[in-house]
Every structure is written in structure tokens, then in C-alpha cells.
Image (tube, helix red, strand yellow):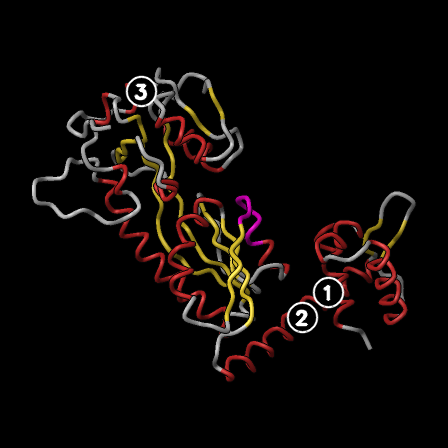
Amino acid sequence: MLELRRLVLICEFARRGSIAAAAAALGYSPSAVSQQLQALEREAGTALIDRTARSAELTDAGRRLVAHAERILSMVEEAESDLSAHAGTPSGRVMVTAFPTAAVAFAPALARSLRRHTGLTLRLGQARSGRGMREVRSGEVDIALVDDWYGRVRDSDSLRVFPLLRDPLVLVVPRRHRLADPDVPLDLRELRDEPWMATPDGEPSRLAVDRLLVDVGGIRPTPWEFEGLTTILSLVAKGIGIAAVPALALAGGVRGLAVRPIPGNPVGRDVHAVARGSSVHRPSVSVTLRAIHVAARYIAADLEPVRAAERPRPGDAPAGGFLDSHLGSPLGE
């Protein structure tokens, strides 16, 4: 009889590519993982891993077993979800990961929404773009908030994708920049010689900025590249340069910026929640997905004032969203 926890180990080995990496991911020592995989080989009656002095890789039998094991573990999780769904009360820990700007934007609403479920605890972590779906698939987390710049995130045999909102690129400039005044027309072609700042080559948001500017002849070589959109926003606020960033990045509340919508149909990304199909009916996961959808509606409404580098008219009520600090009188302090 094959033991489930050993099936988990060989699946993790297949994902990570080494015994040491699988051990680190699961919190075991490499020797313990190696011993358990050897025990699995004895249970299977065949060699599953080809070991050399420098490496280890799956045999053909090992790859076949991993394919079976992934289906078996998915069915086990589906059975657990079905049983807990009938129990009805969300409980235990739900693990969520998000790309950094989504983590900042969604955290307050999720904390407020889920705290009434006293038996439920939330752990919200951050993952670089592209890792979230892998972590859901591997079972490291229950839900991932992922960004999709190219329309490539889709349902699969094991994953469910839930669309949340559209996040467009916006132009951010210092409050004393000439384009901070919304009455000044915005023409990207006139900004080619401005001191642009962007994330490093290869980052999704940098690729989006490059796509945005390609139709206007591009810009001169970017003088400064920085890891992290928050760092870029703080530098723009200090008057060091200008940038195009996803509107969601403004959730961090950096002051001293003016926000201008980009004319036409600006480049943007879609934000999705991703979960395993076998887990979505588990009360802890389903209630968290509902809370994420509610948070997304509020955040999407907050993104609407991206068109509002307009000065508020006398008597207008404040927008009340996380963009408030960037709107108002663009020529103020």
C-alpha cells in the first residue's frame, strides 16, 4: 500500500528538482526525505529516482507515479472539502499569497471581512509575479492573487481562475510637475526626454511600460531602474522623475504625487484569484474567495478616479478611496 505522505514527498521532489529543495519546502531534513523516498520505492517495488553522486532525477516509473499521485492527492483534498463543506463552519488556517501591490491593496478588506469568523485564521504572504499559481498547484497555499498582463491565465484541470478587476497603467508625476495640472493635455510623445524610472528589464510592469511607449517612438534609455513599485513612487514624489505604474500600486498611499490617466486604451493587467478546484468548496476557502470578490469590487470602484486628475469642483464629496491622497488640487503640497 502506498502511503499518502510519501506521495506528497515525491510530488514535491518532482516540482523542486532536488531532494534538498523538496526538504526545504516541506520543512524536513534532506536525509529524512531521502529515507522516505527510499521507503516509497520499496512500497512500489521499483526504482523511482535515479541517484548519482551529483544529482537525482525521476525514472520513467517515478514520473508515472507522480502523475497518479497528483490525481490521488487531488481526490483526497476534494473528499476533505466535501466533508468540511457539510460541516459548514469556516475554521483552521487559510493560506493566501499575492503579488506585492495586491497584498497591500487587499489586506485591509480581507482582515475586516474575515475577522468575524472566529475559528478561521488568515495568512497573507507575498510572492513574485509568476509564482502564485505554482504555489497553489503544489498545495503550499490555498489561494493566489495573480496578475495577468497577456490574457494567459486560464482554468486548467486542477486550477480554477476567478477574474477580479482590471488594473490600467497610469502616469505619475511630482505634484509640481507641469503635467500635474489636469488642464494640461497629456501627450506621451512629449515625454520621451523626461527622466523616466522603471522596474528592471524582464519585470512584467517594465514590459508593459515598454509596450505603452513603443507607439510613440519609445524613450531614451531609462536612467534609473529600481526593484519595487513603492520605491519608484517615492522617488517620483521627491521630484526625481516620472513613471507609468499600475494604478493598484497607489494603494500604498505614497503622497506628493499627481496621477494622470493615459489617453486611449492604456496597457493594463487583469487581476485574478486562483484556487485548486478540489478545495473551492471547503468553507475556509470559499468564504475567503467571497471576501476577495467583495474587496475587489471596492478596489475596482477606487480605481475609477484614475480619470480624476481633474480638480474637484466646489461642493464635491471626497472619493474616500486609496487614491484620495493623489487627487485633490494637483498643484498643492
Write down the quadrant of residue 36 in the picture.
bottom right
Classed neighbour count for the residue bearing mark 1: other residues with Cα under 10 Å, few (<14), some (14–19), many (≥20): some
Most distant residue in the left direction: 314
- Assign a secondary structure to mark 3: helix
Mark 1 or 3, nearer chain start: 1
Q: Earlier in the sequence, mark 2 or mark 3?
A: 2
Q: Specify whether 12 is left or right of 238.
A: right
Q: Is residue 21 above or below residue 86?
A: above
Quadrant where the N terminus is found in the figure: bottom right
Give amino acid for label 2: Leu
Give residue 73's mark: 2
The residue that disc 3 covers is 191
- Residues at marks 1 and 3, CA–CA distance in whole angstroms: 53 Å
Residue at (55%, 65%) from the top-left corner? 276
Query: Distance between the Cα atoms at labels 2 and 3?
Result: 54 Å
Quadrant of the drawing holding the C terminus = top left
Q: Nearer the viewer, residue 158 or 215?
A: 158
Q: Which residues are magenta?
A: 126-133
Secondary structure beneath dot 2 equals helix
Image position of 63 (left or right of 306): right
Which of the marked residues, 1 or 2, is nearer the chain's N terminus? 1
Residue 47 in the image: x percent, y percent?
89, 62
Relative to residue 225, is residue 261 depicted above or below?
Answer: below
Residue furthest bottom in the image: 86
Find out whether residue 131 is within the magenta segment: yes
In the rendered structure, find residue 8 and report the number of the disc placed on it. 1
- The amino acid pointed to by label 3 is Leu
Compared with residue 315, is residue 23 higher up or lower down, i.e. above or below? below
